[in-house]
Amino acid sequence: MSLVEQLSNSLPADRVVVDPDVIASYQHDEAEWAPFAVPVAVVRPRSAEEVQAVVRACLAHGAPVVTRGAGTGLSGGANATEGCVVLALDGMYAIKEIDQLERYAVVEPGVINDHLRAAVAEQGLWYPPDPASAPWSTIGGNVATNAGGLCCVKYGVTRDYVMGMQVVTGTGELVRLGRKTAKGVAGYDLAGLMVGSEGTLGIITEVTLKLRPLQDPQRTVAGYFDSIVDAGRAVAAVAAAGLTPSALELIDKQCLIAVDAWKNMGLSVEANVLLLGRIDDPGLIGDQEAEKMLSCFDEAGATWSAVSTDQEEADALFAARRLAYPAMERLGPVLTEDVCVPKKHVPEMLSRIEQIGLRYETTIANIAHAGDGNLHPLLITPHDDLPARERAQAAFAEIIDAALKLGGTVTGEHGVGLLKMGGLVQELDPVVLDMHRAVKKALDPHGILNPGKVFAS
């Protein structure tokens, strides 16, 4: 019996997809130039037991399993490999439980981030992790890459909110990891180990997420800067002043022009670089901190700055930040970096990115979760221009080198996938890499879970 026959026999009729046109839409994520293959089939399960059946069928045939959510990833982590089954979890989208007293939610991996945030808000609660892709990305994908977002400078990343989960292991077992209690130190933190593992250690079929009370109203501080380095100095000044903003985001001129061309927001007329900060401390303290942030902007060379009194206007500015990446995609292939450096080195790193772009004759736009040093240079190339692509890839590698030299990391939230495998080898000690491989071997002894990703076996 072939693998597709076994899958078809063990699952409901509509779960297994072999139509080439449909399969083509599941072959890769949003990472530019990351390699991918044509999968044997796509399976869209509706339950943990169906996921388990897929893994067991793949074990029997020695076939790889590549798990994906919405396909919004930017590192190639969900790209199909030769002979694999793509396990698409976007059909598992139930919000199973919201506990107001204990402040947690139990959700399936296909739940859209913004849908969860809206659902818990109705009960006076808040799920903070908010990647720019929150309107489209899934909780399962956020957990798999340990996604961050705009609020993470103050409230942490996905890892900080994962309490427990249900997982199908590499041997086809269905297990529960973690807890639902506020505290718990029984055994190793295996649930934490799954966060950021990109489908290489297990397949997450349910997640228990910690919630917070609804966020207090926010004050938005906006600043225009002539140069990206001046904006970087403002970021460092905010940190040096002891402020912990609820968001601190950077958008450069090229991104602003692209957003204006798409949505006609008019932001690029006056600003070369836009820096957006938010303070959510209540009352007088919040007012004082907003003014202190405003002073940091001005002292760093802002050409204009203000504390917004118009919530609709402030929300529009942050909407522009979320639109920056898709707006740039409209101009041509975009290779997206995701380095993170200490906050004190943000000005220097931004300067180095500018220099790298000039040296390789590559257009590099910049957006950033600047408040925690997570920078997203966007390397843009014309369509079907191979020399430009090769220059961009060389620039991409040099940006990684620069971040590591400044004490940073090769990825802050997008994951390693395929694009950052070389960078991970640079960043980690060989002994530490061997520890990673030992964990992988222990939890996926047959090597079927997303093989060839994160690090070479």
Image (cartoon, rainbow, N blue to C red):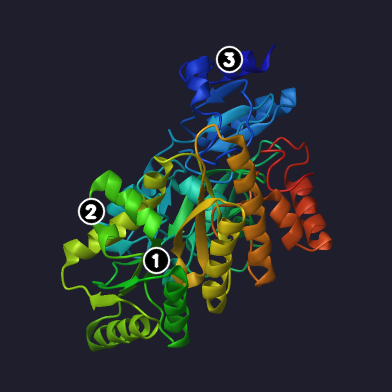
Out of 71 and 339, give the one closest to the viewer.
339
Q: Which residue is mark 2?
A: 265
Mark 1–mark 2 CB contact (< 8 Å):
no
Residue position marked by numbered label 1 in the rendering:
249
* Picture mark count: 3
Label 3: how many Cα within 10 Å (few below 14, some 14–19, many 20+) = few
Residue corresponding to mark 3: 9
Residue 95: horizontal and vertical position, in percent?
A: 37, 45
Q: Residue at x 37, y 52 (%)?
A: 324
Q: Are marks 2 and 3 in contact (CB under 8 Å)?
A: no
User: Crowding near pointer 2: few (<14 within 10 Å), some, many (20+)?
Assistant: some
State left or right for residue 446 relative to residue 13: right
* Amino acid type at mark 3: Asn
Which amino acid type corresponds to the residue marked 2 in the rendered image? Answer: Met
Q: Residue at x 45, y 18 (%)?
A: 14
Between 447 and 409, the one lying in front of the other is: 409
Judge depth for marks 3 and 1 and give the one in front. Answer: 1
User: Comparing marks 2 and 3, which lies closer to the viewer?
Assistant: 2
Q: Quadrant of residue 202?
A: top right
Q: Nearer the viewer, mark 1 or mark 2?
A: 2
Q: Quadrant of residue 127?
A: bottom left
Is the C-beta separation of discs 3 and 1 under 8 Å?
no
Q: Secondary structure at mark 1?
A: strand
Q: In the image, is residue 279 above or below residue 295?
A: above
Quadrant for the N terminus, please.
top right
Using the numbered discs, state the Cα–Cα distance from disc 1 to disc 2 in whole angstroms.
18 Å
Name the quarter where the C terminus is drawn: top right
Give amino acid for label 1.
Answer: Glu
Q: Could you say where residue 320 lies in the image, as x and y percent from the top left?
A: 31, 55
